[in-house]
Amino acid sequence: MANSQDLGLKWYVLRAISGKENKVKEYLDAEIKKGHFGKAVSQVMVPTEKVYQQRNGKKVVKERNFLPGYVLVEALLTGDVAYRLVSAPNVLGFLTDGKNPQNSKPAPIREAEAMRLLGQSEAMPEDDEVITADFEIDQKIKVIEGAFSGFQGVVEEVNRERKKLKVMVTIFGRQTPLELDFTQVEKDA
């Protein structure tokens, strides 16, 4: 069986209405399944990443769009294929080379770049996990993990790059600073 490179297929980026990327994928997948694109479009992907969040003291895994507003399409843009892709509901157009705004052509991205973007949707090792937390300075928190579990404190500093908080807790009647991971605390009611 010939691979996509042998057929001349290249990866292109479709711009979509933000939040409608999965609808675009569903529509184009249905069109591919019906055979409306023949062999000109092989696959449609929405780059996603796994995000770990703390909710009620539990680690929750969600998938979110890695590149909101974009959908990757592996296609051979011959005939009216480009027009039919752009005419799909919720599609705004192709990402183009941008050289001439009136006559821009869809610009393919390198296979390696597409694989890198799509690799974001694979399971991430625990070390590289993305943790989202919306902690703010002067916010009250409760420590839920570690030696100080059960203590309450106030956020003094937020370091999003390191996923750490500097928290002031009262231990034996004295204010004591602690450095804690986002996963070790939760918002206090």
Image (spheres, rainbow, N blue to C red):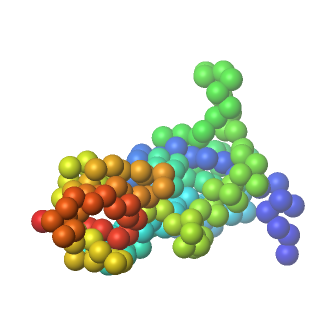
Residue drawn 66% across and 48% down?
12
Can I make out residue 69 in this image? yes
Horizontal side of residue 127 vs 141, given as left or right: right
Q: Position of residue 167 (x, y in %)?
A: 29, 58
Q: Position of residue 36 (x, y in %)?
A: 61, 62
* Front in this rendered view, residue 148 or 118: 148
Position of the C terminus by quadrant: bottom left
Location of residue 185 by image quarter:
bottom left
Is 142 drawn above or below residue 16 in the view shown? below
Horizontal side of residue 147 vs 102, given as left or right: left
Residue drawn 23% across and 63% down?
169
Horizontal side of residue 18 vs 28, given as left or right: left
Location of residue 182 by image quarter:
bottom left
Residue drawn 73% across and 63% down?
39
Horizontal side of residue 99 vs 126, given as left or right: right
Is 108 drawn above or below residue 9 in the view shown? above
Can I make out residue 77 in this image? no
Residue drawn 51% across and 66% down?
129
Q: How many marks?
A: 0
Position of the N terminus by quadrant: bottom right
* Front in this rendered view, residue 110 or 50: 50
Instruction: Residue lying at the far left in this picture: please name it.
Output: 189
Q: Position of residue 25 (x, y in %)?
A: 51, 61
Q: Position of residue 132 (x, y in %)?
A: 39, 59
* Front in this rendered view, residue 145 or 23: 145
* Front in this rendered view, residue 124 or 83: 124
